Image (spheres, grey):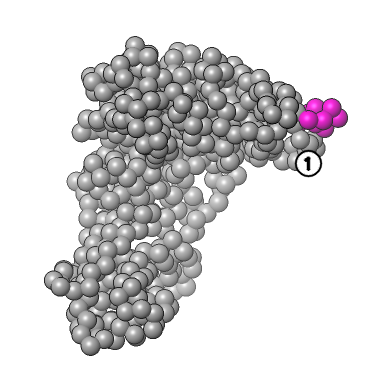
Amino acid sequence: MIPADQDELKNAGMYRDFILDHYKNPRNSGTIENALHKHDSNPLCGDELDVYLKIEDGTIVDIKFQGHGCAISQASMSMLTDHIKGKTVEDVINMEKKEMLDMLGIELSVSRVKCALLGFLTIKKGLVEQHGNT
Amino acid sequence: MNVDKIRADFPILQRKVKGKPLVYFDNAATSQKPKQVIDAMHDYYLNYNANVHRGVHQLSEEASQAYEQAHEKVGKLINAELEETVFTRGTTDSINMVAAGLANTVEAGDEIVVTGMEHHSNLVPWQQVAKMKNAVLKVIPLTDDGRIEERAIADTVTGKTKIVAATHMSNSLGTINNVQLMSKIAHENDALTVIDGAQSVPHFPVDVKKLDVDFLAFSAHKMLGPTGIGGLYGKKKLLEELHPASFGGGMIREVTEQDASWADLPWKFEAGTPPIAAGIGFGAAADYLLNIGMQHIHDHERKLTIKALDVLNKDTIDVYGPAADHRGGVVTFNVKGVHAHDVSSLLDDEGIAVRGGHHCNMPLMKKLGIQGSVRASFYLYNTEEELDVLNNALGKVAKVFS
């Protein structure tokens, strides 16, 4: 069946099951002691985020996060933390926004792209502060 | 009040969003504009565009007259004289202008009183004055349902209070405050009131004489007018004493090399070439509202608010703010367990425009223990059928996040 409205189809996809699953059951939720800790917030929506990164020999061996936020920002963090665990700091610093958005695989409006990138940018900022721009 | 006839004046209400008819419930952020307002601004640019208060040529005469009349129309809406109706860039600009002008009257140890439901625009300027002058910023506390009781005002305002800055209607809770009572208590303590009327002037009858407020700030764009312009009412005597914050052309009477004197009210506060078309649009908006009648608009919004509170009366939804008797056409809520922006996005998919976030009131959100909320705010062109659309859409939100 051809959808009556292309927009409707596109937007129905924003809250797909896998996004909601990551939102309701976030992977890597929690804190890590004696780890690199970075706090950030999005003043527009009041979202808050704390990320903890355990780094050994330039590799992210563990990562956890805690925060309040919308389904898009929380699902993004859940997927991103899974994605970068085991990667080198250098890899993550060099990671492009597109990689994050492709991982989500949903159409986002301009304002919601910010939700998707909050965690990504927070982690990058934290790593650059700690390890410098590679 | 014929809502169908009113809706026909707003071409934007015919458009579709995501394939659905637009349901515009974000009126507390900005209102839509009727053809009459757009036409008035258009007419100025097409037919008599000229600077005001300058030339003696025909076009300038026409523009000056239209711009002055716009002040009279806006003044009429709030029962103020021309001399008491200053055009500004908007509510924020109006409040900053008063704050800058009154700062000189504040001394160390004096008190500035605000309420716990102020928009950042009626809080941050006073924080700055208090810091600059070593004054004490006091906050009138709210009841759990977001109201201000007489006792709370009387307990907070003292003989040391110089300024009481309060909103007439909360943009985040919808609460309508008794600013007449606030002014009475302020005056008994020789303090002045600065009222944020951004949400009240567009929605119900506001009579500055009856309320006896000292200053009232409001925005054109929330009352069917254009952005970039707003109003500042001040009692004539107070405006005469108030020092202007912006200097230059248009606001002077006489200038010598070393000194200058100020033009008559309200022009003393309108330095530089004003946004003339916007001013004329502001006047047309006031005319439009006066033709319909502010009481009719208020009654209509009240009906919508009562129905909205009924629609939102669900186990899965938290509603903030007071009962319908104490509020205007703003309802703020959260769907339990769902972020305000997710609710807003899902409602947007149904063509419904609402606001999600902290509504420029971070201290209040903190007090309520929430990051943000969803706000639906109504105006004269909204209908009860649109609330049925909201009701259905909320059902879909619950389904997605179940």
In the rendered image, is residue B388 in sight?
Answer: no
Task: Check residue B59 for magenta coloring.
Answer: yes
For mark 1, what is the residue?
A: B46
In the rendered image, is residue A44 in sight?
Answer: yes
Quadrant assignment, res B375: top left
Q: Residue at x 44, y 18 (%)?
A: B213
Q: Is residue A106 left or right of residue B215?
A: left
Picture coordinates of residue B166, whole percent (x, y): 37, 28
Task: Check residue B73 for magenta coloring.
Answer: no
Quadrant assignment, res B400: bottom left
Q: Which region is colored magenta?
A: B54-63
Task: Give the total number of marks visible in the rendering.
Answer: 1
Furthest toward the front, the residue is B258
Picture coordinates of residue A99, whole percent (x, y): 39, 80
Q: Residue at x 38, y 18 (%)?
A: B191
Image quadrant where one finds the C terminus of chain B: bottom left
- Which sits in the foreground, B317 or A83? A83
Q: Residue at x 63, y 20 (%)?
A: B265
What crowding class fits label 1: few (fewer than 14 Cα within 10 Å), some (14-19), or many (20 or more)? Answer: few
Q: Is residue A4 left or right of residue B402?
A: right
Picture coordinates of residue B48, whole percent (x, y): 79, 35
Q: Residue at x 51, y 18 (%)?
A: B238
Q: Secondary structure at mark 1?
A: helix
Quadrant assignment, res A60: bottom left
Furthest toward the left, the residue is A33
Picture coordinates of residue A13, whole percent (x, y): 38, 69
The amino acid sitting under disc 1 is Leu
- Which sits in the foreground, A38 or B347? A38
- Which sits in the foreground, B131 or B311? B131
Chain letter for mark 1, please. Answer: B
Q: Is residue B226 above or below residue B207?
A: below
